[in-house]
Image (tube, helix red, strand yellow):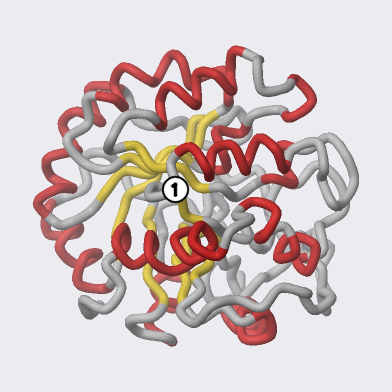
Amino acid sequence: MTDRPLTWKPNPRQTRVDLPDGATDCHCHVFGPAERFPFAPESKLKPADAPKEELFALHDRMGIDRCVIVQSGTHGFDNRAMLDAMAARPGSYLGVALAPPDIPDADLAEFAEAGVRAIRYNYMGHLAPGASNDDLRALAPRLDAHGMHLQVHMESAMIEEMAPVLSEMPIPVVIDHIGRVDASKGREHAHFQALLRLIDQPHVWCKVSGTERASRADPPYADAVPLTREVAERIPDKIVWGTDWPHPNYRTDPPDDGDLFDLIPEIAPTPELLQAMLVDNPTRLYRFGEGA
């Protein structure tokens, strides 16, 4: 037994959505097991374990064939839990790591060999601080040399501030969780409009995940779906989707993953958009099929 909080809901209900072959969860995490992979001392969140076996079970049940595991701030720069999960399903499970901006090139090469496709930085108040603009400028060509891109998780209030440096990046930039906008403020709010301007840049992608985080309502999160759908329809060739399992730092009780899967056709209402979001775009961005 543990007093660490469980951030995910066991036994989610089965989704009503039939997913296409090659469907990809492009944003999820693994936590622990803490006895094997200790949490970072500086992490404010010390959750119950959410090990790879539970992630695999969710994917197998819902019809997910491929995955991109994103390193969580819970483990900090110790990416071993993520790499261990990737190695258990080689080729079909890739990764996004956390790393300091001055990470040695040899370490980047090891990451690339293991199937890491990007480095992520957080600009959220409850997480460790991200890299400076100068750090990002220096790191970008080094990531490019290893076939990696940049992933950014930021407060919606920071989109306008970070847009200039992200716009000048020579590599793809992926914005997490539709920029963490607040759906209750509506599409005309400055934060959502800043997101739209940023994703209009040809190299800027967006994860149309986190609808439940943008929402201020109960499932089916009807207040936020129109914003997520607008992003998807605006840049259909630059969107990917993810569960965000096991839902760290969620505002209430953990969401039911069945509810989140049921949002997929609401976000991507045509067969063509759904295929792009779940299969074709992930293949292109993460280079599935190129080996580890």
Towards the viewer: 109 or 47: 109
Q: Is residue 277 rendered to the left or right of residue 216? A: left
Q: Quadrant of the C terminus?
A: bottom left
In the displayed structure, would residue 251 be above or below residue 123?
below
Identify the residue at image location x=29%, y=21%.
165
Q: Quadrant of residue 94?
A: bottom left
| Spot occupied by residue 41 in the image (x, y as percentages of width and height) | 55, 49
Q: Mark 1 highlights which residue?
A: 236
| Spot occupied by residue 66 in the image (x, y as percentages of width and height) | 46, 76
Identify the residue at image location x=38%, y=59%.
281
Towards the viewer: 79 or 185: 185
Q: Quadrant of residue 182?
A: top right
Q: Is residue 166 rendered to the left or right of residue 245? A: left
Identify the residue at image location x=67%, y=49%.
45
| Spot occupied by residue 243 in the image (x, y as percentages of width and height) | 63, 61
Towards the viewer: 38 or 10: 10
Towards the viewer: 262 or 1: 262
| Spot occupied by residue 71 in the image (x, y as percentages of width and height) | 46, 57
* SS state under label 1: loop
Give the residue type at disc 1.
Answer: Pro
In the displayed structure, would residue 261 be above or below residue 143?
below
- Crowdedness near tag 1: few (<14), some (14–19) or many (≥20) residues, C-alpha within 10 Å: many
In the displayed structure, would residue 96 be above or below residue 177?
below
